[in-house]
Amino acid sequence: MWLQATFTTADLAHALDRICPAHVRIDEGRWIDIARPTTLELIDGIGVRLITEARIRWTVIGIDVPITIKEAEIFLV
């Protein structure tokens, strides 16, 4: 089955607004929080580029290590 859809930038921004912020649990003690995108850009031939903030928590030898990323680029292809 093949499904093809056409989204405007406004449609995509609205859809992302409904799912962000997102909390992605990797496994026990590790997760990533992705904030609402501050920038949404369609890149011809590549996909969609989001610029956002993210927080990561990683447990290393039993110690929680929180990391804040002020500007992260995420590509949706």
Image (cartoon, rainbow, N blue to C red):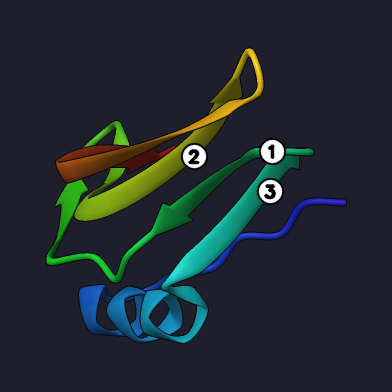
The image shows residue 47 at horizontal and vertical percentages of 33, 42
Find residue 9 and report its horizontal and vertical position in percent. Answer: 23, 73
Q: Nearer the viewer, residue 20 or 66?
A: 66
At x 36%, y 48%, the residue is 55
Give, as a three-letter code, the residue at label 2: Arg
Q: Secondary structure at mark 3?
A: strand
Q: CA distance from mark 1 to mark 3?
A: 8 Å
Q: Residue at horizontal 27%, vertical 32%?
A: 45
Q: Which mark is residue 29?
A: 1
CB atoms at circles 2 and 1 under 8 Å apart?
yes
Instruction: Answer with the quarter of the image where residue 76 lies.
Output: top left
Q: CA distance from mark 2 to mark 3?
A: 10 Å
Horizontally, residue 36 falls left or right of residue 25, namely: left
Which mark is on residue 42?
A: none
Q: Which residue is mark 2?
A: 57
Q: Earlier in the sequence, mark 2 or mark 1?
A: 1
Residue tagged 3:
25
Viewed as shown, does residue 25 lie left or right of 59? Answer: right
Question: Considering only vertical position in the picture, is 47 above or below 60?
Answer: below
The residue under label 3 is which amino acid type? Arg
